[in-house]
C-alpha cells in the first residue's frame, strides 16, 4: 500500500522554467543564449515585432509560407537549410508540425495565445514561450519552458520600465469605464507611453509582482468557461468565417473576412475596437488583410458579444 500523508510528491519536470517581462524578451533570451549565429526559418504570417527583433539581434533568417487555413505549406520547408524552426500556435490552436523533418533542429515554439503549453511532440531541442499580456489583463509577463541550456543571468531582477505606465493606464481606464471618473485621453496617453517604452527596450526583465499575483488568481477555470461560452455563441453567428475552430485556449474568436479595414472603421464608429493580429510585415500574405479578432475575456458580457455580432452583420448587410 502506498504511504498516505506527509509532503506531496511531484512529478519531475523535464524542462527548465523561466519568466520574463514579455514575449519579446523571451525571444531575445533564446537568441542571446548562444543562438545568434544560427539560421532561422520563420513563418510569413507573424507579428512584425518578431522580425524586428531578429534584425536587431543580427540573426540570419528566411521564410516559409502559411496557408489561408493557418497550416504550413510543407514544400516551403523541405528544401530549406536551417538550424532553428520558428513555429506559431495561431490564436489558441496548435499548429501541426510533427510531420516535418525537425528531429535534429531546434524548435522555437511561439505560444503567444496560450496560457500554458508543453513540448507535445517531445522535440530533442525545444524552446517554448508565450505572452500573458496578449491573452489576459496582465500588463506584462511571459512563460518560458525549454530543455535547452539558457543564460538566465541575462534576466534583470527588476520590473521593466513600461510596466508602471501600463498598469496606471489600466487603472484609469477602469475608473473611467466603471465609475465615470477621469478622461479617456489620460489613459490612452499612458498606454502609448508604455508601448513606446516597450518598443525601445532591449534589456530582458523579470515578470512584475503585480502580474504574478494576477496569474495566481487567473488559474481558475472560470475565465475559460466564460470565454468558451462566448466563442460558441460567435461560432454559431459566423461558422464559415471562423479561422480558429480547434481552439486549445480561448482568448479570441478570429474571423477571416473581406473588406476587413472598412469593417474596422465601421465598428470604430460604434465604439467597438477589435484588434488585428497582425499588421503587415515585410512578407506578402493575404491573411494580413483579412483577419480580425474578437476578444472573449470575462470583463465583457454576452450582451457585448451580441452587439459585436449584430454590428458586423449590419456592416455586411449595407455592403
Image: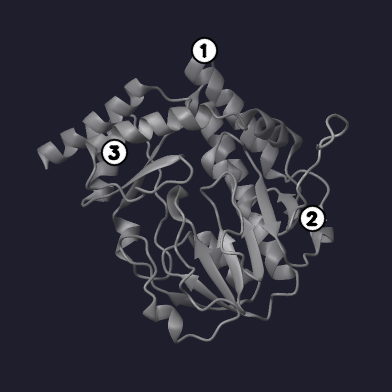
**For residue 174, side relative to residue 29 (left or right):** left
Location of mark 3 (residue): 235
CA neighbours of label 3 inside 10 A, class few (<14), some (14 to 19), many (20+) = some
* Residue depicted at x 25% and y 35%: 236
Q: Using the rendered view, name the quadrant where residue 54 is placed.
A: bottom right
- Mark 2–mark 3 CB contact (< 8 Å): no
Residue 20 in the image: above or below residue 136: below
| Outermost residue toward the top in this view | 179
Residue 251, position as x, y percentages in the image = 46, 39
Q: Identify the residue position indicated by label 1 in the image.
A: 179
Q: Is residue 111 above or below residue 318?
A: below
Image quarter in which the N terminus is found: top right
**Of pointers 1 and 3, the one earlier in the residue sequence:** 1
Q: Is residue 145 above or below residue 122?
A: above
Extreme residue in the left direction: 318
Residue 155 is labelled as 2
Q: Secondary structure at mark 1?
A: helix
- Depth check: 62 or 88 in front? 88
Q: Residue at x 15, y 40 (%)?
A: 316
Q: Nearer the viewer, residue 156 or 266?
A: 156
Question: In this rendering, would 282 be left or right of 181?
Answer: left
**Which residue occupies the foreground of this view, 1 or 171?**
1
Amino acid at each position: 500500500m502506498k504511504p498516505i500523508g506527509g509532503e506531496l510528491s511531484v512529478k519531475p519536470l523535464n524542462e527548465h522554467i523561466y519568466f520574463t517581462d514579455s514575449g519579446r524578451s523571451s525571444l531575445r533570451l533564446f537568441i542571446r543564449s548562444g543562438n545568434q549565429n544560427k539560421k532561422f526559418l520563420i513563418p510569413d504570417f507573424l507579428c512584425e515585432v518578431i522580425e524586428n527583433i531578429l534584425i536587431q539581434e543580427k540573426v540570419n533568417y528566411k521564410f516559409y509560407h502559411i496557408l489561408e487555413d493557418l497550416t504550413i505549406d510543407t514544400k516551403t520547408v523541405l528544401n530549406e537549410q536551417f538550424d532553428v524552426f520558428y513555429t506559431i500556435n495561431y490564436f489558441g490552436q496548435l499548429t501541426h508540425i510533427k510531420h516535418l523533418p525537425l528531429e535534429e533542429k531546434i524548435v522555437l515554439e511561439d505560444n503567444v495565445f496560450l496560457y500554458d503549453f508543453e513540448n507535445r511532440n517531445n522535440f530533442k531541442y525545444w524552446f517554448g514561450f508565450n505572452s500573458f499580456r496578449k491573452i489576459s489583463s496582465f500588463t506584462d509577463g511571459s512563460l518560458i519552458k525549454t530543455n535547452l541550456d539558457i543564460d538566465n543571468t541575462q534576466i534583470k531582477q527588476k520590473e521593466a520600465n513600461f510596466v508602471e505606465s501600463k498598469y496606471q493606464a489600466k487603472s484609469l481606464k477602469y475608473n473611467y469605464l466603471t465609475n465615470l471618473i477621469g478622461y479617456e485621453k489620460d489613459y490612452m496617453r499612458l498606454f502609448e507611453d508604455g508601448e513606446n517604452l516597450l518598443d525601445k527596450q532591449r534589456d530582458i526583465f523579470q515578470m512584475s509582482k503585480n502580474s504574478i499575483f494576477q496569474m495566481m488568481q487567473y488559474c481558475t477555470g472560470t475565465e475559460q468557461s466564460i470565454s468558451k461560452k462566448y466563442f460558441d455563441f460567435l461560432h454559431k453567428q459566423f461558422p464559415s468565417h471562423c479561422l480558429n475552430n480547434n481552439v486549445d485556449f480561448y482568448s479570441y474568436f478570429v474571423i477571416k473576412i473581406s473588406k476587413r479595414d472598412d469593417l474596422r472603421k465601421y465598428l470604430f464608429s460604434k465604439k467597438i475596437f477589435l484588434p488585428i493580429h497582425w499588421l503587415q510585415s515585410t512578407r506578402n500574405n493575404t491573411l494580413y488583410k483579412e483577419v480580425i479578432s474578437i476578444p472573449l475575456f470575462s470583463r465583457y458580457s454576452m450582451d457585448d458579444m451580441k452587439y459585436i455580432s449584430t454590428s458586423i452583420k449590419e456592416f455586411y448587410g449595407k455592403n
